[in-house]
């Protein structure tokens, strides 16, 4: 790796602080470590194994990239997605690191050339797909190479209890068996105890320390709204809060992805679909446009997103309920990787719970797996229904105690919902469900409660029941909220044998007898959440640029972005690989007029200074 003469050479000392900090600065242009990064780098460089859990955007990559540069040999990174490998390697090459990939996109000749470089000691980092690593050819190759470490990225894929299980990851246990003396570092975003235990067991990390960073992403504003017309709500959300921003919209089905993308385009939002039903070429083109262009919205199934390094995704929206809090956290975490204010928005309704429960009930999984899946779904529904701080509930799920009871940057903190005694409403609803034989869905029950003489109501003579019209004090929207919350509390449940029907559970008895307290949340009418571009009660949640002396020059920001786009097109890499937005903001704020001043901007390492320094200084001077 072409580290400048002023930077120290690689070494294998256990006390690596001075070298690690110097390489961090010279290669990556960063002035210091964040959180536990330094401790992790020291541990792995010294030959130790470990499990690292950090939020998306928390700096996991540096935890294996730096030890790979500091240890003798090449760091082998197991990565599940081609897009992730490609973008990380592009960024490393820009920083002057000798990096390469070994995956199915390479021809035989190209793969042979990479293998030759590995054996010759001409690589610092090699990214390998798990399927490729497990082949006899690749294992024999690694046995003959000088390997610095193994990094297993997205390690939650090894767990059947995780939200993104991949069978090929199970085979990675061979790493510990074949290479017991090479340090292993497994990395993932937050995971529950079951998932963590399986990662440790399968990857042979039983005696290794776990480094668990805070899972809080204070720059992300969490908001969950009652689903009415999801597409219209989404269009209003984007128009009011994120016009012109890059974003990801998640839908459960391919058809809904297509419909939503078409609706957004019709409303003037440039949106592209992404799902497994599209041909590979279309998927690749749409993903490349999202990564390389500004302001593109991708509408996707959950097949999209893992490993996407795009730092300036300003919002992630869900039109359907994810399967678990882990999935929700992982997906929403793709917003605001650069630390700037961003949104996690979800439209949620009773149909989401019914659909997810039916999918679990109809799955071919073992009963134990179904029980765990239902427990995970219930936890997510509780997050959606809570009247308290969503961030506190989210962090608590992962075992983290938040610094404050209220974050000041979620919908419940910014516009607190009313909480009222809902015992009488709950009794009316449960009685209605019981007296109709527990064979009908939400809409029919609401028709009876509000006294609506529909064809079905009269057909079944439900207008003759004592519960007919007893709920006229609430409107349809309010009753939908009552039903949804009673399902969330476990007093009502979807009937797996009668599609759409709601039946009473054992706990409903206590509600009907008046022995169980029922508190219901009700959103304040007309409540509006401010744009994430404004300041929250916690102050400006965007990261501060080191050395900034004032506001960024808007004209210079525009000029730098235009220059970056041109360089990215010429080099065939994403714009953020050339310079991150935070680096552009730092330049536009400090306005350095010398190379030495530019070198002090975070994100400007020696290679970027060498490649782009003169052009950047010229842009600063031209902007005055």
Image: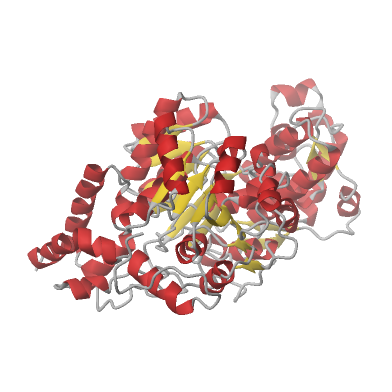
**Residue 268 figure quarter:** top left
Q: Is residue 38 visible?
A: yes
Q: For this view, does 611 lie left or right of residue 537?
A: left
Q: Give 39 or 432, whichever is nearer the viewer.
A: 39
Q: For this view, does 9 lie left or right of residue 140?
A: left
**Quadrant (top left, top right, bottom left, bottom right) of the N terminus:** bottom left
Q: Give 149 or 426, whichever is nearer the viewer.
A: 149
- Residue shown at 21%/75% (left/top)? 597
- Residue shown at 71%/37% (left/top)? 354
Q: For this view, does 521 lie left or right of residue 432?
A: left
**Residue 129 figure quarter:** top right
Q: How is the image coloured?
A: secondary structure
x and y percentages locating residue 216 in the rendered image: 56, 66
Q: Is residue 478 visible?
A: no
**Quadrant (top left, top right, bottom left, bottom right) of the C terminus:** bottom left
x and y percentages locating residue 47 in the rendered image: 60, 67
- Residue shown at 87%/48% (left/top)? 508
Image vertical order of residue 285 relative to residue 456, above or below = below
Q: Give 505 or 52, whichever is nearer the viewer.
A: 52
x and y percentages locating residue 421 in the rendered image: 74, 61
- Residue shown at 36%/49% (left/top)? 90
């Amino acid at each position: 790796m072409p580290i400048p003469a002023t930077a120290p050479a690689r070494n294998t000392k256990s006390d690596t602080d001075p070298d690690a900090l110097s390489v961090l600065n010279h290669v990556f242009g960063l002035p210091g470590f964040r959180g536990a990064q330094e401790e992790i780098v020291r541990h792995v460089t010294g030959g130790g194994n470990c499990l690292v859990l950090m939020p998306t955007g928390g700096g996991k990559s540096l935890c294996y990239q730096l030890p790979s540069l500091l240890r003798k040999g090449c760091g082998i990174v197991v990565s599940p997605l081609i897009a992730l490998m490609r973008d990380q390697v592009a960024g490393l090459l820009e920083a002057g690191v000798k990096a390469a990939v070994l995956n199915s996109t390479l021809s035989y000749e190209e793969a042979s050339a990479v293998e030759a470089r590995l054996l010759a000691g001409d690589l610092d980092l090699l990214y390998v797909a798990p399927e490729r690593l497990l082949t006899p050819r690749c294992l024999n190759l690694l046995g003959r190479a000088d390997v610095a470490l193994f990094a297993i990225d997205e390690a939650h894929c090894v767990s059947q209890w995780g939200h993104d299980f991949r069978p090929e990851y199970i085979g990675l246990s061979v790493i510990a068996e074949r290479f017991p003396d090479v340090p292993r570092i497994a990395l993932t975003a937050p995971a529950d105890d079951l998932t963590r235990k399986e990662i440790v067991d399968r990857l042979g990390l039983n005696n290794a320390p776990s480094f668990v960073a805070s899972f809080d992403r204070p720059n992300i504003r969490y908001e969950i709204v009652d689903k009415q017309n999801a597409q219209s709500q989404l269009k209003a959300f984007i128009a009011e809060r994120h016009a012109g921003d890059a974003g990801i919209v998640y839908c459960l089905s391919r058809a809904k992805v297509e419909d939503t993308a078409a609706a957004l385009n019709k409303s003037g939002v440039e949106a592209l679909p992404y799902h497994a039903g599209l041909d590979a070429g279309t998927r690749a083109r749409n993903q490349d446009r999202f990564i390389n262009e500004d302001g593109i919205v991708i509408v996707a199934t959950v097949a999209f997103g893992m490993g996407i390094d795009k730092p300036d995704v300003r919002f992630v929206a869900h039109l359907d309920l994810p399967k678990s809090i882990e999935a929700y956290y992982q997906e929403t975490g793709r917003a605001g990787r650069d630390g700037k204010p961003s949104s996690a928005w979800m439209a949620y309704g009773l149909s989401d719970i019914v659909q997810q429960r039916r999918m679990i009930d109809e799955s071919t999984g073992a009963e134990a797996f179904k029980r765990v899946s239902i427990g995970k779904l219930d936890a997510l529904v509780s997050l959606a229904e809570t009247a308290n701080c969503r961030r506190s509930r989210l962090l608590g799920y992962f075992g983290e105690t938040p610094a404050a009871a209220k974050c000041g940057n979620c919908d419940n903190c910014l516009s607190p919902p009313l909480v009222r005694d809902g015992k009488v409403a709950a009794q009316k609803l449960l009685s209605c469900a019981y007296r109709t034989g527990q064979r009908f869905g939400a809409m029919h029950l609401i028709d009876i409660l509000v006294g609506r003489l529909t064809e079905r109501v009269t057909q079944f003579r439900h207008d003759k029941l004592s519960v007919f019209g007893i709920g006229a004090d609430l409107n349809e929207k309010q009753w939908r909220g009552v039903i949804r919350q009673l399902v969330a509390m476990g007093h009502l449940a979807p009937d797996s044998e009668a599609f759409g029907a709601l039946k009473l559970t054992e706990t409903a008895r206590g509600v009907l007898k008046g022995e169980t307290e029922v508190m219901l949340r009700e959103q304040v009418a007309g409540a509006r959440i401010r744009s994430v571009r404004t300041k929250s009660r916690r102050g400006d949640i965007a990261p501060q640029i080191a050395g900034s002396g004032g506001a960024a020059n808007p004209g210079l920001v525009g000029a730098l972005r235009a220059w970056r786009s041109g360089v990215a097109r010429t080099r065939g890499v994403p714009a953020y690989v050339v310079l991150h937005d935070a680096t552009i903001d730092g330049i536009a704020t400090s306005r350095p007029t010398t190379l030495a001043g530019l070198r002090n901007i975070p994100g400007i390492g020696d290679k970027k200074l060498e490649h782009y320094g003169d052009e950047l200084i010229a842009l600063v001077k031209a902007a005055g």
